[in-house]
Amino acid sequence: MTCLGCRLALQEERAFVVYETKWVTCILDILPFNPGHVLILPKLHALDVDDLDQQTAHEVMEASRVMSRAMKAAYQPDGISIVQNGGTFNDLDHYHMHVVPRYEEQDFADFHRAFPETEPVSDEELYKTQKYLQKYIIR
């Protein structure tokens, strides 16, 4: 059985995909810090950043550029945070990069404190966010 991250990247599990290439799948986080919070998942299994092959690492970074441009156009945030948690902090047991629109009043430490208290967003809201963000993706 593949890990959850692999199943999400390969769309074997339900996910709200906003962007996909041969190498990566970008999905909405179901516990978003802000609307538009995306996870970039490589389609080949890797646990940590140092496990990524050169092509996959390049594709992850390119996807982060695509997602950042789309978020800036869609949400006009004050900035974008790009975060990758490795080792015991990797809750999917699969490499993934968070790309998150953020605003001035949001301290970076809040990003990490928010998740245990956050409720999953409804499928209806995720669908709306998916369609909205996709309108701003330039390939």
Image (tube, rainbow, N blue to C red):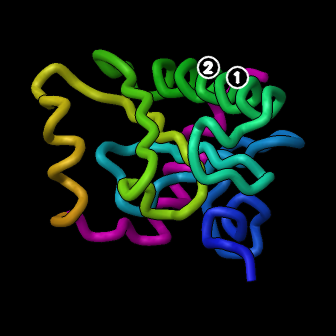
Q: Residue at x 54, y 63 (%)?
A: 93
Indicate which disc residue 65 carries.
2
Question: Looking at this view, is 113 or 44 the one in front?
Answer: 44
Please provide percent x and percent y for residue 31: 36, 60
Label 1, on which residue?
A: 62
The number of numbered discs placed on residues in the rendered structure image is 2
Q: Which amino acid lies under the numbered mark 1 shown in the image of this protein? A: Glu
Alpha carbon of mark 2 to alpha carbon of mark 1: how far?
Answer: 5 Å
Considering every residue shown, the one lying at the far right of the view is: 22
Look at the numbered discs 2 and 1 and tell me whether their residues touch, using CB distance below 8 Å: yes
Q: Is residue 126 above or below residue 97?
A: below
Q: Quadrant of residue 3?
A: bottom right
Question: Looking at this view, is 50 or 135 the one in front?
Answer: 50
Indicate which disc residue 102 carries.
none
Q: Quadrant of the C terminus?
A: top right
Please provide percent x and percent y for residue 72: 46, 19
Q: Residue at x 83, y 29 (%)?
A: 55
Q: Residue at x 65, y 24 (%)?
A: 61
Specify whether residue 133 is painted magenta. Answer: yes
Q: Which amino acid lies under the numbered mark 2 shown in the image of this protein? A: Arg
Question: Looking at this view, is 52 or 106 the one in front?
Answer: 52
Q: Is residue 116 above or below residue 77?
A: below
Specify whether residue 111 is painted magenta. Answer: no
Q: Quadrant of the N terminus?
A: bottom right
Near mark 2 (Cα within 10 A), the count class, few <14, some 14-19 or many ≥20, is few
Q: Does 123 sit left or right of 21 as displayed?
A: left
Q: Is residue 98 visible?
A: yes
The region drawn magenta spans: 118-139
Q: Residue at x 72, y 58 (%)?
A: 9
Q: Does 63 sit left or right of 127 as displayed?
A: right
